[in-house]
Amino acid sequence: MSLNPPNSLTIRVSLGLRSYPIEVVSEPSLDRSEFIDFIKDSLERTWSGKGCRKALIVSDSNVIQTWAEPYAAALSEMGLETALAEVPAGESSKSLFALSSIYDRLMDLKADRHTLIVAVGGGVIGDLAGFAAASFNRGLPLIMIPTTLLAQVDSSVGGKTGINHPRGKNLIGAFHQPIGVWIDINTLQTLPEREFKSGLAEVVKYGVIQDPEFFEYLEANAEAALARNPTVLQHLVARSCRLKANVVELDELEHTGQRAILNYGHTVAHAIENVAGYGEYLHGEAVAIGMVAETKLAESLVWIDSRLTQRLIHLLTRLQLPTTIKSCNIELLMAAMKHDKKNKSGRVRFVIPRRLGKVTLTDEPTDEQIIAVLKSLSNPEN
Ligand SMILES: NC(=O)c1ccc[n+]([C@@H]2O[C@H](COP(=O)([O-])OP(=O)(O)OC[C@H]3O[C@@H](n4cnc5c(N)ncnc54)[C@H](O)[C@@H]3O)[C@@H](O)[C@H]2O)c1
Ligand SMILES: [Zn+2]
């Protein structure tokens, strides 16, 4: 079947038998026939998809009516017996309780190994529904329909699924690749402003770690991106997916360390999120500050001069993302970083730029250098 509808960009994630397409469409309204073709094609390609007769759409209370119900109608139109499962919006739904409610819906539907799970929502829904798909009946076919910018450029690509344990985030999970990812850029139009900007931080990250031209594209189109220009957003999402897919293709199961470059900005970001308490900073806001911190560390190591840091700060500021920390308890931040489970033998590890488009994982920064950078980020006026 020929795909590639006119307003769509296709990214192929090459993982042998687990390969799948990501379709990024920018049509203002959902065109059912294109979507149905995409689903049929994705089902046809896989053993579990071939016998598919039923589907369960998982979504959250903010998204279900506007974005999930039209997809339910399209799946019914295809002849699939379709049910909808709704969980409350927010991180608290990455729980055993919510997971169990999805299993219940699958039991009600008399799901078999060919029942399709469709995740319509942000990263919370992708992780939760993805893990339900990974675990129920030892694995069901999964389609991701991400509706936040973060989910479109990050969490829907790469196959990581999971829920939280009360004592730790993402502790219960599995790798389970989707059979297809359908991204409708139009869903971003209803996303709250702060969530949207937060997602832009991960987009900037891809430019710094892998693609100087993409960074320049963002510099040239920052205001259009903020205004959610569909053409700019489509390129920005498609390129981000391609860049993440490149890394995932090299290191699908996070065994070789190559996937680590995706953690640029994240050592400091996780410490900020921990110390401030989850919710004070959105993830992308903490990543924006973390990227500035880790670029400053590159200056301390004399790997780069200050021009890259200045360019980064300028771009993030134009995207209305924070580049300094409000009230900064340096001792607590240091303690949080030292506890990071990704550390080796007590040294804190960072992903640090060598130049624009190239980063290295290193534990070279000394405590004194880290403290000096954190001090420079503290901005008590705000
Ligand atoms: N699996 C991975 O590789 C991976 C990578 C990064 C993050 N994550 C996970 O992703 C989660 C965060 O994802 P998120 O930022 O998308 O959060 P989220 O799913 O909570 O969505 C953020 C908010 O936006 C709302 N929303 C979603 N789409 C909307 C739309 N189109 N219009 C209006 N409102 C909308 C949601 O209801 C929610 O209130 C975290 O749990 C994180 O651990 C996973
Ligand atoms: Zn992140």
Image: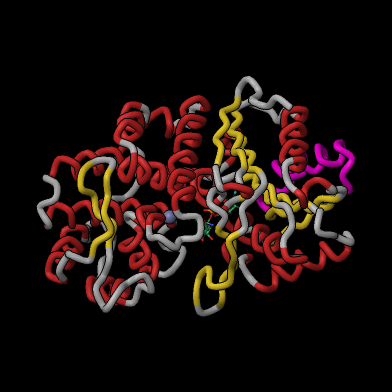
203 to 285, vertically: above or below: above
Asked if residue 141 can be seen in this view, the reply is yes
Report if residue 377 lies within the magenta region. Answer: no
Magenta highlight range: 61-81
Instruction: Using the rendered view, name the quadrant where residue 251 is placed.
Output: bottom left
- Coordinates of residue 331 in the picture (x, y in percent): 23, 76
- Coordinates of residue 75 in the picture (x, y in percent): 82, 41
- Colour pattern: secondary structure
- Residue at x 70%, y 66% (from the top left corner): 135
- Residue at x 68%, y 47% (from the top left corner): 143
Instruction: Using the rendered view, name the quadrant where residue 255 is placed.
Output: bottom left
86 to 39, vertically: above or below: below
Instruction: Using the rendered view, name the quadrant where residue 128 is placed.
Output: bottom right
- Residue at x 82%, y 63% (from the top left corner): 105
Which quarter of the figure is the C terminus placed in?
A: bottom left
Report if residue 80 lies within the magenta region. Answer: yes
Which quarter of the figure is the N terminus placed in?
A: top right
266 to 202, vertically: above or below: below
- For this view, does 230 lie left or right of residue 302? right
Count how many numbered circles sit on residues in the image.
0
- Residue at x 76%, y 64% (from the top left corner): 102
- Coordinates of residue 380 in the picture (x, y in percent): 22, 61
Helix, strand or loop: magenta stretch: helix
